[in-house]
Image: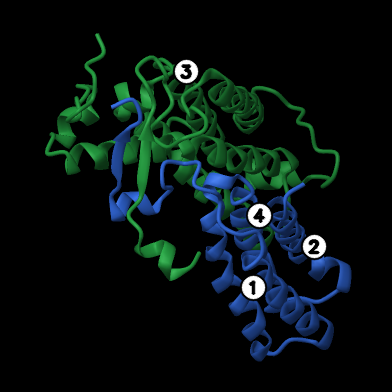
Amino acid sequence: MSTEQRAQPITVDVHPPGDDRPPGWDGNPSAWSQRLPIVVLALIGVFVAGWLALYQQEIVHTVWEPFFPGGTETIVRESGFSKFFERFPVGDAALGAFGYLADAVTGVIGGTKRWRTMPWIVVIFGVFVGPFGVLSIMLVVMQPVLYSAFCTLCLASAVISLAMIGPAVDEVLASMQYLRDVRDDGGSVWSAFWGNEHTFAGEAVVA
Amino acid sequence: MSTRILARSAAVLIGIWLEAASAVLGYGTPAANVDRVLGPVAGGIAFVAIWAVAHPIRWATVPAGALLVLAPVLGYPLEAAVSSVLSGLAIIALAFVGGDPSGDYGGGWQALWRGRERSCADG
């Protein structure tokens, strides 16, 4: 990108009423075709983390571990990280499963224009998806460095949570652009955040 | 396949290599631990940056690459030093490949701090 381009103001075309795409976007990040894959990934995450949780709580006694013999047991039952969670009502794997469930639920709520009609749910969705990815990288680092072991399903879980970030973050961007536009138009960002749609100067009011 | 996807995938593979390198080449700490911290960090970030809208996050792999280039001063065996320096240089170089996503995203992330003008095509 050249400095000349940088100096140019960004101008975006507002799509006509009935077109759910955000201004200046070729696609609609809130469309079901964009959101369903994330929800499917999240549900796979619920399954993977849920299995690890059942194994961790010793409710089931077998776990899929084709690559690192004894690795899953070391990580989810014996590691200091997992032991730390024994003082709480739920273990770290169960928390992970709940996190994926939250991803799935916040991915489903709202219609195909929710980047504008429900910025709050999009932001909550982003908060569940984004920091989870950071946490996943930390957990991948901890396995060999602190516990000299790997756990196949834990690694799979990390890949799933990282794979959700890219598809999810576009919707967050669209919502944040909208809120920035509201502020520049003199509207209340707080009100727009909670779903009171702002009508821009010169924009047709959609019933 | 776009150069963005190829470049990011290459960086992911380097991250995976770093995760395995100490076992493959047979070296221990400190090199093994540095590799297995920076490998997942750089590889994980590069993986997220495969998606066009998240592509700018690839720049966050550059500090990890720089640390890999510098890390052999901690006292690495030769094979670990070669692996670390080459991996680090490759990660840095790859960040410059793939370009910026086209303006299909309403001005992208920079619209958030620069603001933007809305134009209604049909008046």
The chain containing the residue under callout 2 comes to B
Q: Which mark is residue B20?
A: 2
- For the question of whether residue B10 can be seen, the reply is yes
Could you give the CA–CA distance between mark 2 and mark 3, rounded to whole angstroms?
38 Å
Q: Residue at x 69, y 59 (%)?
A: A144
Q: Residue at x 87, y 67 (%)?
A: B24
Q: Residue at x 84, y 82 (%)?
A: B79
In the rendered structure, which disc, 4 or 3, sits on the residue that comes first in sequence? 3
The chain containing the residue under callout 1 comes to B
- Local packing at callout 4 (Cα closer than 10 Å; few below 14, some 14-19, many 20+) is many
Q: For the residues carrying marks 2 and 3, which lies nearer the camera in this image?
A: 3
The chain containing the residue under callout 3 comes to A
In the rendered structure, which disc, 2 or 1, sits on the residue that comes first in sequence? 2
**Quick check: B50 left or right of A191?**
right
For badge 2, the amino acid type reads Ala
The residue indicated by pointer 3 is A108
Could you give the CA–CA distance between mark 1 and mark 4, rounded to whole angstroms?
26 Å
Between A90 and A199, which is closer to the camera in this rendering? A199
| Image vertical order of residue B20 relative to residue A55, above or below | below
The residue indicated by pointer 1 is B92
Can you tell which chain is drawn blue? B
For badge 3, the amino acid type reads Val
The residue indicated by pointer 4 is A143
Could you give the CA–CA distance between mark 2 and mark 4, rounded to whole angstroms?
13 Å
Q: Quadrant of residue B99?
A: bottom right
For badge 4, the amino acid type reads Gln
Callouts 3 and 1 close, C-beta under 8 Å: no
